[in-house]
Amino acid sequence: MGASKLSGMQKQVLSLYRGFLRAARSRPTEDRKRIEMIVSTEFRHNSKEVDRKNFQYIEYLLRLGTKQLDQLKSPDIVSLSSIKVVTSKT
């Protein structure tokens, strides 16, 4: 069974996703479940809504996600909230 090769950007997205899940593990159970739900929902939504060839927007989402992950890792942050990023379809 041959494994498909992932692009560099796909590896970055998966790494970010795993980073969020790892960061969630350091939180209390209730917060962890909420964080995992938000992260899963956001990643699934973006996987369906974002054009895979829109590299500029994917890079933007990666930068945004990385900033959010850094904030989540901070001991001063209590939880994570979901934000809605609206883009034009043009």
Image (cartoon, rainbow, N blue to C red):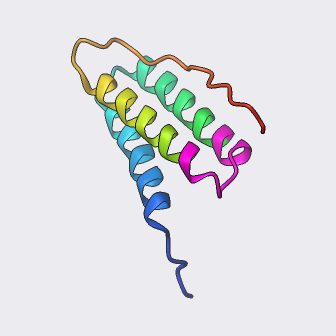
Q: Is residue 81 part of the magenta span, yes or no?
A: no
In the shown orientation, is residue 48 left or right of residue 85?
A: right
The tally of labels here is 0
User: Relative to residue 83, is residue 20 drawn left or right?
Assistant: left
Whether residue 54 is in magenta: the answer is yes
Identify the residue shown where x is 54% and y is 47%: 56
Q: Residue at x 35, y 42 (%)?
A: 19
Counting from the top left corner in percent of width and height, residue 15 is at: 39, 52
Q: Nearer the viewer, residue 33 or 58?
A: 58
Q: Nearer the viewer, residue 29 or 21?
A: 21
Segment colored magenta: 45-57
Q: Which residue appears farthest toward the front when viewing the image?
A: 90
Q: Residue at x 40, y 45 (%)?
A: 16
Examine the rendered structure and indicate whether residue 30 appears above or below residue 9: above
Q: Residue 24 location, x and y as percent?
A: 37, 31
On-image quarter of the N terminus: bottom right
The answer to which of 57 and 2 lies nearer the viewer is 57
Q: Quadrant of the C terminus?
A: top right
Q: Residue furthest bottom?
A: 1
Residue 49, by quadrant, is top right
Quadrant position of residue 65: top left
Main SS category, magenta section: helix
> Residue placed at 39% from the left, 27% from the top?
68
Where residue 62 appears, as percent x and y from the top left, is: 45, 42
Picture layout, residue 79 above or below residue 15? above
The percent position of residue 52, horizontal first and vertical second, equals 65, 56
